Image (tube, rainbow, N blue to C red):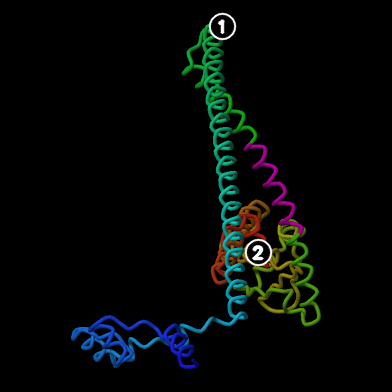
Amino acid sequence: MALDSIIPAWLRNRSPEPEAGQGAGESRNGAVPQSPETERRAGQDGVSPRDADSPSPDLDSPPPREGLLSAEAELRARREEIVRMEERALRDLESARTRLREADRRTEIAEERERNLDRAEEEIEAAREARLAELEQVSGLSRTEARKLLLKEVEEEAAHQAGLTVRRIEEEARLDAERRARGILAVAMQRLASGQSIESNTQVIHLPNEEMKGRIIGKDGRNIRALENLTGVDIIIDETPETVVVSSFDGVRREVGRLTLEKLIEDGRIHPASCEAAYEEASARVDDLMVEAAESALLDARVTGLHPELVRLLGRL
């Protein structure tokens, strides 16, 4: 009786038999038979067909819950970042469109202003032409004739103003030159006064004979007075034989007096008229010497463009 109850329970719990062929092979080997091509590929990959068909425990086991939560959080963060990037891109695009519209608006305004300026220039030119036509009709002169007349008046006015300006500049230059020359001479005289001796203020002139002293003095001293008045120097005639001394603190005057006296001695005719002629010749000669000396000094100093009056004053030094 116990055997009758055990056998039906065993039959119920027993799994059904596999089909013929395939079922028998699976029950014996525990795997589905593989084709030769599948076995060859599995051999090339370094995996046996039996290992390839065997289920992996990692694939069948469920992933851990913490990994799923982390992946979901990362995916959600990436989606939010993409949304923010899209929003920034949309804002940048809208800003670019706004700037483009503003640029177009400004361009239109500028073009409109340019058109207005062109119209205004055309109106001004038309008004000017009309005004010129009226002036030509009233004055009876053509445009060319009126232009010539106007230019002539402008040239005359400009020449007059230029002359006044030149005269004013020359006068200012002359006054400034004199002031500067006096200052330079004063400084030079102060620096040289301590070492200056009586010989530097005199010029000794040798006479051909003692009779020439009487000719220089003249009747009642007329010749020597004329010479001293003309040259501004002192002519000293003493007991020194065949010698006359010309004395002056002004070097230019002293040189003019020396040349004048030498010219008279050379000519032999000494009287007030000849004294005046000899003085004029000596003055011109000294002026030329001063200009030559000044130009030579300026050339050595590489200075150009000075006023002629400044050159002459520089030569006096």
CA–CA distance between discs 1 and 2?
62 Å
Quarter of the image for the C terminus: give it.
bottom right
In the rendered image, residue 172 lying in the magenta stretch gets the answer yes
The one of 94 and 22 positioned closer to us in this rendering: 22
- Classify 199 as above or below 91: below
Residue at 59%, 73% in the rendered image? 74
Q: In this picture, which residue range is highlighted in magenta?
A: 162-179
The one of 240 and 88 positioned closer to us in this rendering: 88
Q: What amino acid does circle 1 point to?
A: Val
Q: Quadrant of residue 306?
A: bottom right
> Which numbered dot is residue 288?
none
- Classify 284 as above or below 255: above
Q: Position of residue 276 (x, y in %)?
A: 65, 53
Residue at 58%, 52% in the rendered image? 90
Left or right: where 10 falls relative to 165: left
Q: What amino acid does circle 2 point to?
A: Leu
Which residue is tagged 2? 314
- Classify 229 as above or below 162: below
Between marks 1 and 2 in the image, the one whose residue lies nearer the viewer: 1
> Which numbered dot is residue 138?
1
The extreme front residue here reads 1
Q: Position of residue 86 (x, y in %)?
A: 57, 57
